[in-house]
Image: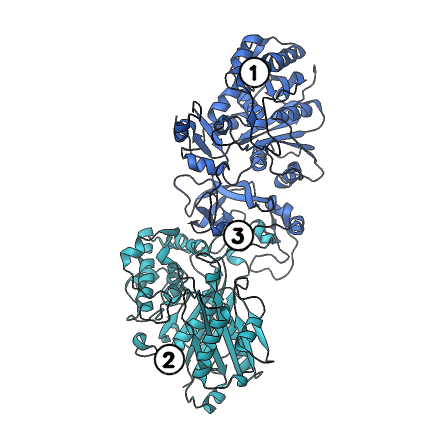
Chain colours: A cyan, B blue
Amino acid sequence: MATGIKDKVAIIGMGCTEFGEHWDKSPEDLMATAFEEALADAGIARDQIGAAWMGNALDDINVGNSALPLAHALRLKTIPVSRVENMCATGTEALRAATYAVAAGAVDIAVAVGVEKLKDTGYGGLPLRTKGLANDLWLPYGSAPGTFAQLAGAYAAKHGVEAGDLKRAMAHVSWKSHQNGAENAKAHLRKAVDIETILKAPMIADPLGLFDCCGVSDGAACVIVTTPDIAKGLGIANPVTVKAIQVCASHGWEMGYGEWDGASVRNTQVASQRAYAEAGIAPGDLSLTEVHDCFSVTELVTMEDLGLSAEGRAIFDVLDGRYDRGGALPCQTDGGLKCFGHPVGASGLRMAYEVYAQLLGRAGSRQLAKVDFGLTHNLGGQPANSVAAVSILGRLN
Amino acid sequence: MAGSQRGIARISGYLPLLRLDRAAAAKALRFSGLGGRGAGYRSVAGWDEDAFTLATEAARGTLVGSYPTQLIFASTSAPFIERSHAGVMIDALALPRTTRTQDVAGSRRCGLSALLDALLGRGDTLVAAGESRPAKAGNPFHFSFGDGGAAALVSDDAPARLIGHASLSHDLVDLYTSREHPTPYSYEERFVKDTATRGIIVPTIKAALADAGVAASDISQCVIIEPLAGMARDVAKLTGITAPNHAADLSAQAGDLGAAHPLFALALALDAAKPGDKVLVAGFGSGCDALVFDVAGQVPGAADTKAVLSQGLVFADYTRFLSLTGALSLDWGVRSEFEQKAQATVLERNGRDTIGFIGGRDAAGNVQFPKSRIPIRPDADGPEPLEDVRLADLTGTLVSVTADRLNFTPDPPFWFGLVQFENGARVMMELTDADARGFAVGDRLTMRLRIKSHDKRRGFRTWFWKAAPLARPEMEG
């Protein structure tokens, strides 16, 4: 009988680069920078690391396949180094791999690094690649905003929401993240934006305007994990621990079976329910969330899928400020994907970086008063065909 | 021909949604003195349509529960040189691969020549013609051409019976296109009019009338292809035919459809004909074929083809017209560089089910696309044999949708969404033929065969089905 991951693994160090347009930095530079911060935070020596995982979603953009780029960048000598990829859930997958290795007793200390170098594509937005596969013969070449925009119309149709009301709630989601991003020195977009500007922005994929879409960034984030006992031995009496990590992947149901209404993401629902059970908490126990706000409507729907808003009520909770930094359950205190940025493979670890900082009281002007549990949520792919990853972090005691 | 009932059993015409208002668009050329008189409409293929898709859409209108033993594709603007479009079309139409196929080309008469061969041949034969002919901006043909398809199913028991015919081969170079010059190069109009009328068209028509044993005055509807506008008047004068010429009407309302023109206009003529009427069709291009039909009754598909003429979306944007017809190559930026290479091995494995839009019905009756070893049904727990189900001829309902303005498409925006079929199948699909309203959740949709990927670098393309509004807007006036 599986007993879950709760409190079996401690996070002893984290690092994260500034996210943004790093024209002057290579992916190796970014990985090394994030790692050095994490290493210093953990207070361990490089040769104490027993295994490493590299999370990178788009290997064809100046990173390369395999985990060799990480092994080279950090000069990791002879230890097992592996690459994981699960679209936008990649960062959390890297954390999961390192966490499981420690929990299994395979290694004492493991490191996970997520990295992406999106600004080497030569244009904005995520790249599009076809590979001559069978799916390329029929699947639409929709962009990321295009695939997520589908949520909006289906949500509005299901709940009888006027398009204008949904648009205003979506705008509030982005407004809130810009407010938070403005106070984060590492965020890609650090400027507050007013609601009218958001509402009037050029359309990208109806009804998503420019400000409904997250930043596309370069960046890396890193986590070092070990057992709580080893953490204590390093002088960390009450370390941050992993309470749960759950992943749920589509098997074709949403896109191929005539049941899903297109207004929610089942993988988020399932992964979060499993995560709450693994952590032994209820949604109401959370102090903050860092969710996959690749697009404003995604965050809005995710609030329902995580069980934080009742079905069909997220637009009211959003507009009431429930998820603002001063609200009952702050979301994206670091600016989220929207403003911290979205270097795909790094994003899951960036979310953990903010929860870790909030748990340790290191979040500066963004620091919340009382932080017991924080949730991270990654959503890879598209609502109709996704991978959802949910983690819950807290303190050991 | 006496005694034979072989003739046209069904007929169909297809036009793209878009119709260029020639007069309005020609204003953009006013500075140059080019653009012609600019009247009527020109049907314009969407970015995802070509001669093959237009012909296939027309062919769909002729297939009602029957399999022809032969399929002939006719076009002078087919996308491939070495790759049989008829061979792809039997997959798109889900016809047996034992169907005999051939592509014909060589002149814009090829569609009618193929029809004549089918009428003189044996077995149910489907002739499907399509054109989307390029022309240079400023060339009169750029406005006078139209894009479209037409198809006729020939069988031994048909309401429009062939009663006479004649043919003349004559290498009159009124215009030509070649590998080196793929857009039309034409010669002096008076030369063409005089030579084609007196030397080619009129004698062929007279010979066909004689073969049918009918007088010119017996012809009640006609289709006379005019290499240049106004020639039919001279032909009428010299042959004595006074019947309305549906080829000219089609040119005015949609343009010269090349190889598809005689077949499409024949559908219009058959729609106008009454039982007992005699109908003449004369096609031109490197000679002439003239056919005379005796109409015993309504030809299925003729009325629908007539309706197609007045359904469409009028536009007057000359720059968009230039772009859609390939006369202007816009720089779409880096996003348009994305790789679209198709693999022959994948086409071999999946091509027939994809272009045929063949899904599978599982043991519980649910239909899915694409097929899979283990069905998509949630309670399926192992492999099940799936029964083929064609989705192309079904309607669907839109579950989710967006107009994507980020991704490259040659005619933005890129509409796509989740389409639900009543049999349970659900497919994420590209949407096409958006009208001014666009698409919304709950819209009812019909399926259209379109270009899926166009690998310009390697000169290859694939086709798949896209969902379009169930009905087209009626054109005003």
The quadrant of the rendering that contains the C terminus of chain A is bottom left
Evaluate whether label 1 is on the same chain as label 3: yes
Name the residue located 47 percent from the left edge and 87 percent from the top edge. Answer: A231
Residue A359 disc label: 2
The reply to whether the C-beta atoms of the residues labelled 1 and 2 are less than 8 Å apart is: no
Picture layout, residue B320 above or below residue A221: above
| Residue tagged 3 | B338
Give whichever of A79, A337 is nearer the camera: A79
Q: CA distance from mark 1 to mark 3?
A: 48 Å
The kind of secondary structure element at disc 1 is helix
Q: In front: B231, or B4?
A: B231
- Vertical side of A168 occupied by B203: above or below: above
Q: Chain of mark 1?
A: B
* Crowd class of label 1 (few under 14; some 14 to 19; many from 20; radius 10 Å): few
Disc 3 packing (10 Å; few <14; some 14–19; many ≥20)? some
The amino acid marked with disc number 1 is: Phe
Check the residue under mark 3 and report the chain it is in.
Answer: B
| Amino acid type at mark 3 | Phe
Comes first in the chain, label 1 or label 3: 1
Q: Is residue B15 left or right of residue A331?
A: right
Q: Position of residue A26 (x, y in %)?
A: 49, 68
Q: Amino acid at mark 2?
A: Leu
- Tell me, yes or no, whether the two marked residues, 1 and 3, touch with CB atoms within 8 Å: no
How many numbered callouts? Answer: 3
Up/down of B145 relative to B421, above or below:
above
**Is any part of residue A383 visible from this angle?**
yes
Residue at 48% across / 66% down in the picture?
A: A116
Check disc 1 and report the residue beneath it. Answer: B191
Occupied quadrant, residue A289: bottom left
